[in-house]
Amino acid sequence: MQVSVENTSALERRMTIAVPAERVENEVNKRLQQTARRAKVPGFRPGKVPMSVIRQRYEDAARQEAFGDLVQASFYEAVVEQKLNPAGAPAVEPKSFEKGGDLEYVATFEVFPEFTVAGFDSIAVERLSAEVADADLDNMLEVLRKQNVRFEAADRAAQNEDQLNIDFVGKVDGEVFAGGSAKGTQLVLGSGRMIPGFEEGLVGAKAGEERVLNLSFPEDYQNLDLAGKAAEFTVTVNSVSEPKLPELNEEFFAQFGIKEASLEGFRAEVRKNMERELRQAIKTKVKNQVMDGLLAANPIEVPKALLENEVNRLRVQAVQQFGGNIKPEQLPAELFEEQAKRRVVLGLIVAEVVKQNELKPDEARVREMIQEMASAYQEPEQVVAWYYKNDQQLNEVRSVVLEEQVVDTVLQKATVTDKSVSYEEAIKPVQAPAAD
């Protein structure tokens, strides 16, 4: 087999492969013999059809089948021989495939970039440290109470945080517009659910009262037909209900599946969850800084095939997350290209760090991570056992641990500054930079 390789760009390779005629004919004859054993031809018993008849009827199909298999096999042999690492399937262009002659074709494909990860010492990381103070715990208990608020009828004027049951009709230029009317809608004042001025305009209203609100839709309103337009809403208040926060008692504790019925036990369980969230938030922020540093220090070209695959994966995820009657391929690729490129580049860099440093998942850390996740459940032992019985989930945890080991490897040479902050600051998500 003859192979020649041309570098058409930094990552693209154009490989010409010639498969000897003898090998081609052997593959064609092999398929014809297989066909002869099972072919049903009028006038002949199965398995007794002359080869000349078989060849006349089936040779073209056998030759096409052989072509596909030979291309697949010879391409694999060629990339191994040339020590190439394709980043995707090749585009195949046949050059010669005539009976009795060599099979010759051109395969164009991209290879994975070859590089050495460097620049660990140029990476600066701010590592936060924080504790869950009693005041943080008290605030969390209030959040939990508000998440489980109940509303009871109130014989008074509506206030912020009250829940109103309302009917309303909206008009633009005197005409009722689609989606601008509803009956029996529950609305919590101050929730920001309605357009600016709507909820504020109902403060002070009583059950049975009708109010007319003259408002304007925001300029950036999602419905472009309504954006910036003046509207009139006629609102009827059916009822006013005031919020009642639940007591911190056994009934409340039971909603969270906590066996310990005392306030002290509940506080201890909530603190444990907050500490787990804190550890994860700090770890995530360190990891993000390390990954950003690796990206900045190691600019590499991305194979188009990998980028396209990742864009398609993100399209599918978007459809699954937001639903709707839309196919993934209908979403514009440019929406996902930046995120896809970051993922692909980081994947290549992380894989190279693992290779350079001969890293393997630390099984002790794998078990520790599984136990940490399992501790959030009522029967943690069962959760741990489930992970160790499911290879796919276990391998996903191993991948996360391996990524953490990559972060640890970088931190050994990076410039790390420790900073003590409050619990709230530590768990606050990092804001993405504003688009230019």
Image (tube, rainbow, N blue to C red):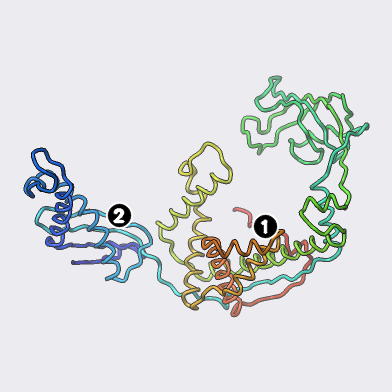
**Of tags 1 and 2, which is closer to the observer?**
2
> 164 above or below 358?
above
Determine the secondary structure under disc 1: loop
Q: Which mark, residue 431?
A: 1
Left or right of 399 on screen, residue 432: right
Comparing 149 with 192, the one in front is 149
Identity of the residue furthest to the bottom in this view = 413
Crowd tier of the residue under label 1, counting other residues whose Cα lies within 10 Å: few below 14, some 14–19, many 20 or above: few
Name the residue tied to disc 2: 91
Label 1 is placed on what type of residue? Gln
Earlier-in-chain disc, 1 versus 2:
2
Determine the secondary structure under disc 2: strand
Label 2 is placed on what type of residue? Ala
In which quadrant of the rendered image does the N terminus lie?
bottom left
Left or right of 165 on screen, residue 106: left
CA gap, disc 1 and disc 2: 42 Å
Please tell me in which quadrant of the rendered image residue 203 appears: top right
Left or right of 260 on screen, residue 334: left
Crowd tier of the residue under label 2, counting other residues whose Cα lies within 10 Å: few below 14, some 14–19, many 20 or above: few
Left or right of 54 on screen, residue 148: right
Identity of the residue furthest to the right in this view = 156
Q: Residue at x 40, y 57 (%)?
A: 304
> 63 above or below 127?
above
Comparing 24 with 328, the one in front is 24
Comparing 185 with 111, the one in front is 185
x and y percentages locating residue 434 in the rendered image:
63, 54
x and y percentages locating residue 79 in the rendered image:
29, 67
x and y percentages locating residue 250 in the rendered image:
86, 52
Q: Residue at x 21, y 62 (%)?
A: 17
Label 1–label 2 contact, CB within 8 A: no
x and y percentages locating residue 25 in the rendered image:
13, 58
